[in-house]
Image (cartoon, rainbow, N blue to C red):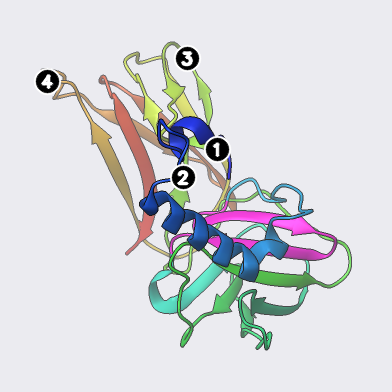
Amino acid sequence: IRNCDWSSDVCSSDLTIPVIMQDRLLAMGRWLERNGEAIYGCSRSPFSRSPWGRTTQKANTIYLHVYDWPQGDRLAVPGLVSDVRQAWMLADATKAPLPLARDPMGVLTLDLRGRHPDEHATVIALQIDGQLRTEDRFVPDADGSVTLPATAAKVTGPNLRIEPQGNLGYWNNTEARAVWSKVQVPAGGRFQLVLDYALAPGEEGGELKIAFGRSEEHTSELQSQFRISYAVFCLKKK
């Protein structure tokens, strides 16, 4: 439990625990019985981003906490360079190995077909062969899309900021920029830039400048010519 005030979040005014909270606490206990190894004694994630959830680490084992089950039952693990000896679902007492492969971009992919996600969070253990090695690149997901999270952007200029919800906000000055470095896009592919944004009433009609570098590891830069209050970007393969 993180950032929990027991008196207000769990207990009633008479310091008894309501039935609904008892059920939740029991569910947490059952989850920890199966997956506590990925919590107790672990250090923080070795990756700067995990699009499907969170990661923890203990010795030569990395634990993938998968909150969003991947489409097509194939989970990409961007940023992991080290070889993996074995992968298994932590709640599986038999440690049945999960099939592993590297896609053409070198990204480790786990085949989860036939597996069932946990109701709360599925934990997958990766046993690393040798020293842990990671890299900080933006590489395509399993479907070929490249997500550009606001939290990984270099933000410059007046007012533009990264909001707690994980989006770019207050983009109301044409001098403001958001830059993503080390964006790796396969050569020869066609991509569509998907922008999820919101504007205040009366702010319609502007334009957005988009620039890409001309190297294998691209730099993506966005400069707004209108007032954006909310923005999230993704490059989707066509």
First reached walking from the N terminus: tag 2 or tag 3: 2
**Image coordinates for residue 139, horizontal then vertical, percent:** 55, 57
Locate residue 234 relative to residue 179 in the image: left or right: left
Q: State if disc 1 and disc 2 touch (CB < 8 Å).
A: yes
In the image, residue 171 above or below residue 69? above
Q: Nearer the viewer, residue 115 or 79?
A: 115
Q: State if disc 1 and disc 3 touch (CB < 8 Å).
A: no
Residue 148: mark in rendering: 2
Locate residue 165 relative to residue 104 in the image: left or right: left
Q: Quadrant of the N terminus?
A: top right
Q: State if disc 2 and disc 4 touch (CB < 8 Å).
A: no
First reached walking from the N terminus: tag 3 or tag 4: 3
Q: Nearer the viewer, residue 85 or 64?
A: 64
Residue tagged by mark 4? Answer: 201
In the image, residue 158 above or below residue 104? above
Alpha-carbon distance for marks 4 and 2?
A: 26 Å
Element assignment for label 4: loop
Q: Is residue 106 visible?
A: no
Q: Amino acid at mark 2?
A: Leu
The outermost residue toward the left is: 202
Q: Crowding at label 3, few (<14), some or many (≥20) Cα neighbours within 10 Å?
A: few
Element assignment for label 1: helix
Residue tagged by mark 3? Answer: 157
**Image coordinates for residue 9, horizontal then vertical, percent:** 45, 36
Mark nearest the camera among 4 and 2 is: 4
Q: Amino acid at mark 3?
A: Gly
Residue tagged by mark 1? Answer: 152
Q: Residue at x 47, y 14 (%)?
A: 157
